[in-house]
Amino acid sequence: MSASDHSPAAVLPGRVAFPHRHLTGIGGLQPHEITFLLDESEQWIEANRARAKNDRRLDGVTQINAFFENSTRTLLSFEIAGKRLGADVVNMGVGQSSVKKGETLIDTAVTLNAMRADVIVIRHGSSGAVQLIADKVDCPVLNAGDGSHEHPTQALLDALTIRRRRGSIAGQRVVICGDVLHSRVARSNMLALASLAAEVRVVGPSTLMPAAVEQMAVTRFTDFDAALDGADVVMMLRLQNERMSGAFIPSTREYHRRYGLTPERLALAKPDALVMHPGPMNRGVEITSSVADMPGRSAITEQVEMGVAVRMACLDVLTRRARGVEGWA
Amino acid sequence: MTTAFVNATLVCPDGGKRQGNLLVEGDCIMRVGDFDAPVGAAIVDCRGRMLAPAIVDLGVFAIDKPACLAGGIVRVGLMPDQSPILDDPGIVQRAADMGKPELWVHPIAAATRALAGIDLAEMAINQEAGARAVATGRGWIADSGVMRRVLAYAADIGLTVVAHPEDAGLAAGAVATEGETATRLGLRAAPAIAESLAIARDLMLAGETGAALHFRQVTTAKGFDLIRAARARGVRVTCGISPGHLLLSDIAMNDFRTFAHLSPPLRSEDDRRAALAALADGTIDVLTSSHDPRGPEEKRLPFADSAPGMSGAETLLPLGLGMVHDGTITIERLFALLARNPARILGLDTGTLAAGQPADLILVDPNIGAQIVADRMVGRAGNTPFDGLPVQGRVKMVMKGGSILA
């Protein structure tokens, strides 16, 4: 039986199904725990498509979205997720310049704690910052992206998208292409998809590839065309120009020529291969518009939709203990 | 004042390990061996415990007297990375006087002005002010022309150059060594060859200029190989290492433990094993604490934002004794690494139990069990990656220049 064929929700009750206090990353999660979160997310997809979207289970819960790094999409997704569950959502946008270093981060954590937040969602530009805060507060902490480390809800929403579109994750050949070196999305996806028994291929120039990436149970390619052979899913990463302080690539023009996903290149994958992108996209750089908008093939807007469902599930699961839900208290 | 240490296990890097007595008169060692204590001498019965030369810690970043005395260190080679930087004779002289009489500070002056790697500092004047060596500090001199001139000039005046071997182009912004841990944690990492590349260049320049070159920390297998080869062809090179790089690999950074954020960063397990082999086979000359106390303001931060460095003075000897207990090195070799060799590099006439040398001694019980506890360290900060580690061995007494300090 492959990892993704587990049906743990039926087997493992309450906290046994997901014993973690925080969600700081995919690393450290068992395959059945990932599957549990995906199963929990499923119920919210239909709920979100209904006209009346409100569920009051997080009534009285204070959710603070502390974003130390700019983000519109993820912040919005978490805000909508919390509000649809009835939580009191507070967004704390902290400019990168005003709060970045020193005790300030710990002070912020202590302050949030003193304000009796019930769940804190954090995005930060430094790898490990979320863990640092999680160690200092009493309530669950959800990682909305920390540096180049992890972005677990993105990986969960990607996995959910793949599972729904392809029927399963186990055995799928997933190609992740682009700036893997700087990408927290890639790290979380490699961990989640490999854990759920997908065959993961990473591709990009060596200058944008972490040194020991093969040790994360993935296969490394530099030739995009070769990597695409037999691919079920092609996941493109944004070329993160803002993270590049040196000469990582000669030009975006050359990058597009070698790693841009064009219709011709997509033809090297399976005929029904899924196209994914965590957004925002650099159209014409890592992906052409004709591929990004390709009906039936592109799952990019669906990923956004799954994002809200996954975040609702994570907020619900992580606050169950505090809410005294049976089996979790 | 005459003090006789009797019933001691004498441990000397030159004389070996043997039972005997040691006589101190004034501030010097007068006699060592089998003799009767003279009438009127104060008697210290060592009860079989080890009497060894006090530690000379080459390459610390802070003057931390309590930590040093707790660790059996009576002399430190102070790195130039201070505030202000040790590049001016007044500052050098002041640093040299800061710890006396308990702790003697031997300044290692900046090799270039403000450690900027551009203009030569006043090495000879700083030498007159008390500098015992010159150093590139925490950084590498990227300009090969400047480094060549630093080595040539230092050779002219008989000063050793203490270099930090890490190619700045490869290591810029990195807080970890490339490998699985750095990849998983998403930390900016540099390849381990950043070290060997820098070593290779500096060895070639040292060979050409005839300078004495000391690498404060060498931590990679390739680096040790280069040093072995250079020595074989006559290059005057020595190197050191701290217990952190001998006993920990990059796995210690898991969970973003900033106490394991060191400079150079912790290496792979293969490199760590190579370092242990280099310690055993004599390639490594110096065991240093690299003492760099950092409080929570600098360590309780996201890993990449935290300051590198560990508080090491108190734990240097117990961790070194651990390597004796497990058979990696002999006790005589340990004290060559801790006392004799660093003293020679700094041009100090100390570090052994020879008659005529300063009476800088420590009495050690190598078998007392203890635990390293960060919160209970007596130094300026408890930033040790060895928190919770059980160790064996403790300093029972410290003598500096004939005076018993602790």
Image (cartoon, coloured by chain):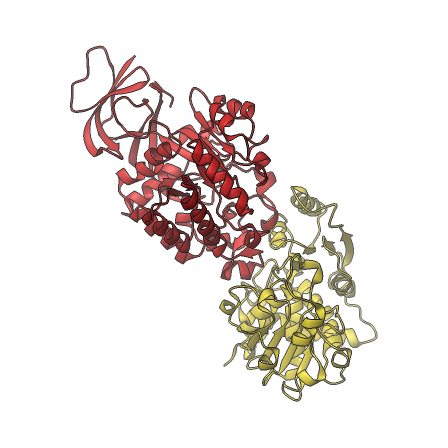
Chain colours: A yellow, B red
Which quadrant holds residue B357? top left
Residue at (23, 10) in percent of width and height: B40
Left-right relation of A310 to B393: right
Tell me residue B240's x, y (percent): 40, 42
Name above or below for residue A214 compared with residue B302.
below
Q: Nearer the viewer, residue B82 or B71?
A: B82
Tell me residue B138's x, y (percent): 53, 41
Left-right relation of B47 to A177: left
Name above or below for residue B236 compared with residue A52.
above
User: Could you tell me if residue B385 is visible in this image?
Assistant: yes
Tell me residue A278's x, y (percent): 70, 70
Q: Quarter holding the N terminus of chain B?
A: top left
Q: Quarter holding the C terminus of chain B?
A: top left
User: Could you tell me if residue B312 is visible in this image?
Assistant: no
Residue furthest out toward the top:
B40
Name above or below for residue B360 compared with residue A275.
above
Left-right relation of B252 to A9: left
Residue at (32, 30) in percent of width and height: B351
Total numbered badges shown on the rendered structure: 0
Residue furthest out toward the right:
A51
Tell me residue A30's x, y (percent): 53, 68
